[in-house]
Amino acid sequence: MMVANSTSYLSPKCVTSRGTLNVAISYLYFFEFPIALLLNGVAAWVSLHLRSTSTFIVYLKNLVAADLLMTLTLPPMAASMLPGAAVELKVFACRYSNVFFYSSLYTGIALMGLISLDRFFKIVRPCGKVLGQNVMFSLGMSTLVWVVIFGSTVIPTIILTNRNPGNDSGDFCMSLKGPAGERLHAFVVLFMEVLFWLVTVLIVFCYIRITVKVLQSFRNSGSNNSQGKKKTKLRVFLILLVFFVCFVPLHVMRIPFTLHILFEDNVCMEMGVEVAHNIVLWMSTTNACLDPLLYIYLCREYRDKLVNILKAGGICVGLHSGKK
């Protein structure tokens, strides 16, 4: 897995500029962490009170778990980016927390693809209900996503990130890998890149078809419900906007950043690639803050349960205050 902790032979000016930018980005992570933790903690609490009676709820619960896990990896990743970070902390980040960060990030992306496919089956192809809308099918697919992504990335990466930190130039995390670890790293990057673009195509296709189907239903029914049409378009637009803003910049930057890590030329211009990658990587983590808000907007069952829990909490507080 990749993380920007390189110590290449750059001019003092480059090193100072990169250090300052890394500090700024790490502070963004520290600022984001409590917000993401609060939102995903609430989402996890609500999801625990939802019965897994539909495929969508199953996928939603798994997505909440992936986002929460990714959120918990943010502090060690941010701390390891600071100039004065201890070597032990950097090693821990490279070997464990950053690996879990990327794996949970892509688990969430894959689950978003399954959610879009679930919406497609339910709205556009109701005949797919036999398989695509079966709860056991959704449980199996969710389990498969976790097993495949974590089994092919987390365990092998931890095992092969087994060298002592070196004093050589280059990326700190890569210095912990032997030849087998470097080959695995290249495979993981390619695997994740392909996975992302496949999910992107799937999401765009599904939501375009869903929009067309819903608008066609309005026309066939002779309804002039312009407000309903606007809500449908806005819902699809928000989903695609969040997905593209959070993830597309990261994957556009992934190729030049990987080439920079593997074939470093030790010039100041490469610092721009590294800093740009760190910025778009942070942008991808904002998805952990946006997803819980989308749940409220997109899932009535989730929204109703959240309202009920908040109301129950208010009643309890009122009763407690009354007793006093």
Image (cartoon, rainbow, N blue to C red):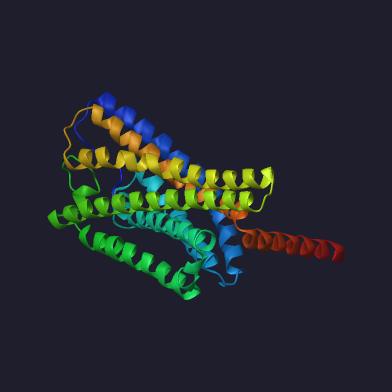
Give the image location of residue 316, x and y in percent.
77, 65
Q: As drawn, is 176 to the left or to the right of 77?
A: left
Q: Is residue 83 visible?
A: no
Residue 224 placement: quadrant: top right
**33 lies above or below 305:** above
Q: Classify the position of the C terminus by image quarter.
A: bottom right
Give the image location of residue 31, x and y in percent.
51, 42
Give the image location of residue 160, x and y in percent.
20, 60
Q: Is residue 93 visible?
A: yes
Q: Which residue is at the far top?
A: 13
Residue 104 placement: quadrant: bottom left
**73 lies above or below 5:** below
- Nearer to us in this view, 68 or 122: 122
Which residue corresponds to the image point at 33% horizontal and 34% vertical from the top-left?
275
Q: As drawn, is 32 to the left or to the right of 220?
A: left
What count of labels does the image hold?
0
Q: As drawn, is 186 to the left or to the right of 64?
A: left
- Nearer to us in this view, 202 or 153: 202
Q: Which residue is at the far left?
A: 179
Give the image location of residue 273, x and y in percent.
29, 33
Residue 106 placement: quadrant: bottom left
- Nearer to us in this view, 273 or 215: 215
Q: Which residue is at the far bottom?
A: 136
- Nearer to us in this view, 297 or 94: 297
Which residue corresponds to the image point at 37% horizontal and 31% vertical from the top-left?
20
